[in-house]
Image: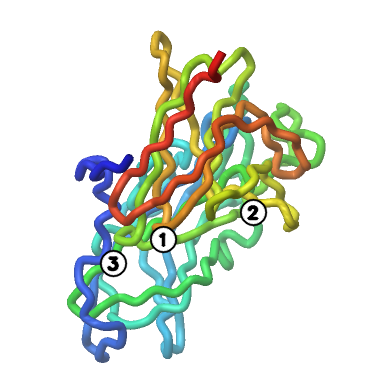
Amino acid sequence: MRATIPAAAVSLMLGLAACSGGGGGSNDTGQLSLGVTDAPVDDASSVVVQFSGVAFKRAGADAERVQNLSPSPRQLDLLQYQGGHAALLLDGVTLPAGDYQWIRLMVDSEPGVRDSYVVLTGGQECELRVPSGAESGLKLNRGFTLPADGSVALTIDFDLRKSVHAPPGQRGSAEACTQGYLLRPTLRIVANAEVGAIAGNVDSSLVTDGCLPKVYVFSGSGVTPDDIEEASGADADPLVVASVAVQNGSTAYPYRAAFLPAGPYTVAFTCGDDDATADDTLTFTGTQNVTVQTNLISTADFAAPTP
């Protein structure tokens, strides 16, 4: 089942407004919008990152171009931007038209300064350190084309489960604050005009005591679901992990996995606690294939087991 995405819900998914070609003369310009979104993480109630600017490298240019934010710097709690929501870093800024080679997010993480930080579910606030964040930033080596007299909207997805790291052996503990958490980001970037979403409901009977409800989304159909692992291997890692909104008094809990490129996917529900640094054994329920189409929401529900 598919439905047209409501305009208010996906204002950021209307990206490529013109296709005037990729070259661009020396005086040609286009407009770029850039947002950030993220996937959930179990151990934290907030993951705040302070951004100071965005740098772009245009093909053939001698130097990168730095675009300051307004206001600058900007502190964003990335956990507030899930399920199709994104925070705009740049909104229709004018840049020279042409082909760009990479994007670099400039992040502040000075020791002893409350710029980037994590708030654990127990309430402890921990420093979030970004190795070389101020010097080299967070670089995405995917290019894009900004058409002359046109516009492009892009979204960067932070996979916080793979990106936020506690000191060894101190995951989720107050002791981790003495050393600080590390942000070694796993990022992907998509053109908003080329993506769709998967959404649905999880039957409340599947969310038992102690459950950490999530829907895993894997690229391709017929994928055998598996946990998240930092180390590369033969097992499939999810492209997106969507949180399930537990609503008291309801028998169906909604979820949404957004900013998915068009194509086939495998989705599965789990209650398990998934540590990206370990090889966890998770139990998945309701595994099914879903096809995503551009600017549409595909539906996948997870029903109660048949008695």
**For the C terminus, which image quadrant?**
top right
Q: Report which residue position mark 3 lands on.
A: 152
Give the residue type that dot 3 points to: Val
Q: Position of residue 92 (x, y in %)?
A: 24, 62
Q: Report which residue position mark 1 lands on.
A: 190
Q: Residue furthest front?
A: 307
Circle 1 — which element?
Answer: strand
Q: How crowded is the residue under tag 3: few (<14 C-alpha within 10 Å), some, or many (20+)?
A: many
Q: Is residue 129 visible?
A: no
Q: Position of residue 89 (x, y in %)?
A: 35, 55
Q: Position of residue 151 (x, y in %)?
A: 23, 69
Above or below for 91 versus 59: above
Alpha carbon separation for disc pair 1 and 3: 11 Å
Q: Are marks 1 and 2 in contact (CB under 8 Å)?
A: no
- Residue situated in front as seen by the camera: 228 or 58: 228
- Residue situated in front as seen by the camera: 58 or 233: 233
Give the residue type that dot 2 points to: Arg
- Residue situated in front as seen by the camera: 93 or 242: 242
Q: Earlier in the sequence, mark 2 or mark 3?
A: 3
- 59 with respect to 26 (left or right): right
Q: How crowded is the residue under tag 2: few (<14 C-alpha within 10 Å), some, or many (20+)?
A: some
- Residue situated in front as seen by the camera: 114 or 139: 139
Camera-nearest label, 1 or 2: 1
Tell me the quarter of the picture where residue 189 sits: bottom left
Q: Report which residue position mark 2 lands on.
A: 184
Alpha carbon separation for disc pair 1 and 2: 20 Å
Camera-nearest label, 2 or 3: 3
Type of colouring: rainbow
- 57 with respect to 272 (left or right): left
